[in-house]
Image (spheres, coloured by chain):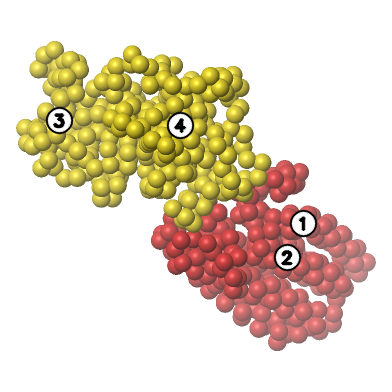
Chain colours: A red, B yellow
């Protein structure tokens, strides 16, 4: 738990209000940590052909869903009790929105886990695992950095994540082209390559959600909504 | 009192030409207040009140320090800030309510429709008819409801006949949202009404002399939430015809009723901005600290 005195949300006259915002942040980071490990386990289960880990990951998604509901409830109560303004309001509203992103990341991890279960049942490892590992690592570091940017209210780091998302998109496009070539080489590869493609698609979506979180961190820190803005404008906002 | 010194006059003139004096803080995080410097948008086109370099002192204590601000026509503007920040003092300058305090000295330029509020030949009674005031605590006269509203028009000679006066009373009570509740008891003594009704009666009394500006000094702080909602609704309706300046301790009220919000701190005007901006991403760190409950 962050030290309240050093925390920009921890210096209200009302200690109880400090506690409520700190709790909201902590709960969000806990949920983020769980989602991060869900993604990690889903990829690991797929690459290692570990059906048991995949099944566990699939089941854990229920915990993610419950955390989403709890966090939304907590945020609604803060609004009802405190009528937060300015940076406190931006925190509460952003948490409500970012929680939805985390939950969707959890869903994508569950999707990957389901693929892992299917692929492990079919036995042999298909082509495309290298891409999954590579893009997976990239996306996991984005989630980690997005949570870190949130915890430290670091808009510069958030901007870096948004730039990385562009790289992930490009990597996804390149991997999709490679898989297409494998499928054309040998039609027996098609069904497995399609599965790998879906996994890559899920990872790419996770990257998008991490990018959304980064946009909210910039909103929290700078008070400017940078969603759907050109990168140059976002850079200006962060530089202010 | 029109005691503006030449350097202030020159500064005020500079502002008139460029309206550029309050430069936004280079570092919004800066908590230092520089005298006469306000972040945000303190000026508007064609203002109702044009206030330049206004300072107010009580003896040797300066309660208001070099404030420049425009108040727009038919604008609702809120003054917020911690107790003792000078917002009420500043409000009371606008219709010279501070005149009754001997040690109070007002400097700077205060123009209402380009006319000097503190000109030595200014008729203060006429000024207060143009710039009405509603106070924190409802203060009806110990007279009937009718006589409370009719009092102002009578002394200002606004009605020659009884029927004219009846019309003014009815219109004022209607505008104050009180007619339906009061029409059958116009002869009852006003002090028998509920707090919320009394406050709306005071608003009707202020409206009865056809003011151009209504100053409200914490008009809802003694009212329950329902009466507060009625007064706020009234403020929204009245904004079509009047300029309204409201001092409030309720941040939510400022957020609900006003178009611009001005934040006062230790006699300085720290920030003036669109209300939406003030409550979502204020420019000055002190504004942010106050509205988020970090001091007050």
Chain of the residue that carries numbered disc 2 in the rendered image: A
Q: Residue at x 44, y 26 (%)?
A: B107
In the image, farthest residue toward the bottom:
A52
Vertical placement of residue B71 versus A181, above or below = above
Q: Is residue B37 left or right of residue B263?
A: right
Q: CA distance from mark 4 to mark 3?
A: 35 Å
Q: Secondary structure at mark 1?
A: helix
> Closer to the camera: disc 3 or disc 2?
3
Q: Is residue A7 left or right of residue A43?
A: left
**Residue named by callout 1:** A160
Q: Secondary structure at mark 3?
A: helix
Counting residues from the N terminus, which is met first, the one under dot 1 or under dot 2? 2
Residue B37 x, y percent position in the rendering: 57, 35
**Residue named by callout 3:** B148
Q: CA distance from mark 4 to mark 1?
A: 48 Å
Q: In this rendering, do the residues under marks 4 and 3 share a single chain?
A: yes
**Residue named by callout 4:** B55
Chain of the residue that carries numbered disc 3 in the rendered image: B
Vertical placement of residue B137 versus B42, above or below = below
**Are the residues flagged by discs 1 and 2 in contact, CB closer than 8 Å?**
yes
Residue B16 x, y percent position in the rendering: 55, 20
């Amino acid at each position: 738990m962050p030290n309240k005195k050093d925390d920009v949300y921890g210096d209200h006259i009302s200690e109880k209000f400090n506690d409520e915002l700190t709790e909201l942040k902590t709960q969000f980071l806990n949920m983020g940590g769980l989602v991060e490990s869900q993604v990690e386990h889903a990829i690991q289960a797929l690459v290692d052909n570990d059906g048991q880990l995949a099944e566990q990951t699939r089941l854990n998604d229920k915990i993610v869903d419950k955390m989403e509901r709890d966090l939304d409830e907590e945020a609604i109560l803060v609004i009802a009790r405190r009528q937060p303004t300015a940076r406190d309001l931006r925190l509460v509203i952003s948490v409500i929105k970012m929680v939805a992103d985390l939950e969707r990341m959890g869903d994508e991890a569950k999707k990957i886990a389901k693929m892992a279960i299917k692929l492990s049942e079919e036995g042999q490892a298909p082509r495309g695992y290298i891409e999954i590992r590579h893009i997976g690592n990239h996306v996991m570091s984005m989630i980690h950095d997005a949570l870190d940017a949130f915890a430290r209210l670091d808009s510069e780091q958030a901007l870096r994540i948004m730039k990385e998302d562009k790289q992930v998109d490009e990597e996804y496009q390149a991997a999709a082209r490679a898989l297409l070539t494998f499928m054309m080489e040998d039609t027996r590869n098609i069904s497995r390559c399609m599965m790998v493609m879906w996994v890559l698609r899920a990872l790419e979506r996770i990257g998008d959600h991490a990018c959304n979180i980064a946009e909210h961190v910039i909103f929290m820190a700078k008070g400017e909504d940078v969603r759907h803005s050109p990168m140059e404008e976002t850079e200006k906002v962060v530089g202010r | 009192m029109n005691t503006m010194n030449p350097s202030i006059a020159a500064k005020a003139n500079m502002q008139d030409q460029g309206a550029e004096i309050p430069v936004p803080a280079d570092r919004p995080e800066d908590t230092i207040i520089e005298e006469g410097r306000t972040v945000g948008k303190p000026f508007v086109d064609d203002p109702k009140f044009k206030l330049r370099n206004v300072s107010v002192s009580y003896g040797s204590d300066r309660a208001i320090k070099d404030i420049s601000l425009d108040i727009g026509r038919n604008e609702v503007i809120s003054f917020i800030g911690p107790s003792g920040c000078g917002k009420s003092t500043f409000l009371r300058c606008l219709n010279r309510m501070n005149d009754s305090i001997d040690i109070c000295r007002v400097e700077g330029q205060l123009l209402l429709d380009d006319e000097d509020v503190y000109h030595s030949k200014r008729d203060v009674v006429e000024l207060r008819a143009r710039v009405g005031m509603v106070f924190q605590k409802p203060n009806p006269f110990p007279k009937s409801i009718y006589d409370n509203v009719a009092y102002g028009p009578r002394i200002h000679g606004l009605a020659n006949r009884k029927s004219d006066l009846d019309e003014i009373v009815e219109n004022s009570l209607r505008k104050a949202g009180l007619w339906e509740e009061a029409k059958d008891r116009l002869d009852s003594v006003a002090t028998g009404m509920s707090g919320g009704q009394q406050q709306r009666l005071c608003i009707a009394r202020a409206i009865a002399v056809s003011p151009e500006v209504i100053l409200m000094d914490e008009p809802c702080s003694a009212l329950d939430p329902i009466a507060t909602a009625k007064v706020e609704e009234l403020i929204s309706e009245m904004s079509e015809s009047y300029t309204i300046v409201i001092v409030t301790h309720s941040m939510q009220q400022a957020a609900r009723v006003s178009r611009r919000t001005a934040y006062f701190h230790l006699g300085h005007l720290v920030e003036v901005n669109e209300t939406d901006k003030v409550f979502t991403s204020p420019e000055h760190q002190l504004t942010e600290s106050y509205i988020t409950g970090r001091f007050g």
